Structures are given as structure tokens and as C-alpha cells.
Amino acid sequence: MTNDLYCFQMTVTFQGKQYDVVITDHARLQMSLRGLTEQDVLNVIETGRVITRDSSNKFWVFRELKERKDNLISVSISVESPKLIVITTMVNWRPR
């Protein structure tokens, strides 16, 4: 990973395990542009549907947030135990 990481002092449960959350600068910028809060991102990670990406430790996690009109909300993550790294966020996302 690059050094553009922002340590977020919070843990999240993902697939039954606890992880420390790290948000990249890129993800933080995308969250800001899309009006997503840290709590929105944690909510998606903990309660969303999961698709494995190109390797066993990278995932798309997505769900609708009822208070938003730009659903689906998607979070791209990399699990690098004990950390869960938020790579980016998207809105109006559709699984392929």
C-alpha cells in the first residue's frame, strides 16, 4: 500500500472478525464528494452484501442506505489483518 493512509480509530466487524479501520486519502476524498460519513462506511461494511474482487483479500461491500437516493452505496476494501483498508467508495453502484 502507499503511504496515503488515514488511521481511523475505530474497529469494524467483517465476516465475523474484528479489524482496525484504515481509510486511504483517496477514499476520504471520495466520501467527501459523495456525502458519505465514516458511520455510513462502517454500516455498509458491517451489514452489506459482499463480492470477492480479484484476490482473496479484496472485496466490494454494498447496500442501500434508506436515507439516501443515490443507492447502492459500495465500499472497496482490502483485508490486511489486523487492518481493514477502505480503498474507495461509490454511489449508484451496480454489481457486475
Image: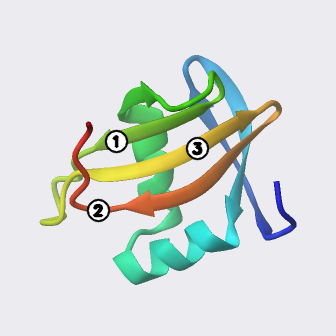
Sequence-earlier tag: 3 or 2: 3
Give the quarter of the image for residue 87: bottom right
Q: Crowding at label 2, few (<14), some or many (≥20) Cα neighbours within 10 Å?
A: many
Q: Position of residue 50 (x, y in %)?
A: 40, 28
Task: Check disc 2 and report the residue beneath it.
Answer: 91
Circles 1 and 3, Cβ within 8 Å, touching? The answer is: no
73 or 57, which is in the foreground?
A: 57
**Relative to the observer, which residue lies in front, 53 or 46?**
53
Helix, strand or loop at label 3? It is strand
- The label number, if any, that marks residue 28 in the structure image: none
- Please rate how many residues cluster around mark 3, counting C-alpha atoms within 10 Å: few if below 14, some from 14 to 19, many from 20: many
Viewer-closest of 65 and 70? 70
The amino acid on which the numbered mark 1 sits, given as a three-letter code, is Phe
The residues bearing labels 3 and 2 have C-alpha atoms spaced at a distance of 15 Å
Q: Amino acid at mark 3?
A: Ile
Query: In this figure, which residue is indicated by the disc labeled 1?
Result: 62
Where disc 1 sits, the SS reads strand
Quarter of the rendering occupied by the C terminus: top left
Mark 1 → mark 3, Cα distance in angstroms: 11 Å
Residue that carries the numbered disc 3 in the rendered image: 77
Assess whether mark 2 and mark 1 are in contact (beta carbons under 8 angstroms): no
Where's residue 88, x and y in %? Answer: 53, 60
Name the colour scheme.
rainbow
Q: Is residue 86 left or right of residue 84?
A: left
Q: Residue at x 69, y 48 (%)?
A: 85
Q: Residue at x 57, y 28 (%)?
A: 14
Query: Dot 1 surroundings within 10 Å: few (below 14), some, or many (20 or more)?
Result: many
Task: Of the two numbered discs 1 and 3 on the same chain, state the one appearing first in sequence.
Answer: 1
Decide: is 46 above or below 56: below
Residue 11 in percent (x, y) is at: 69, 42
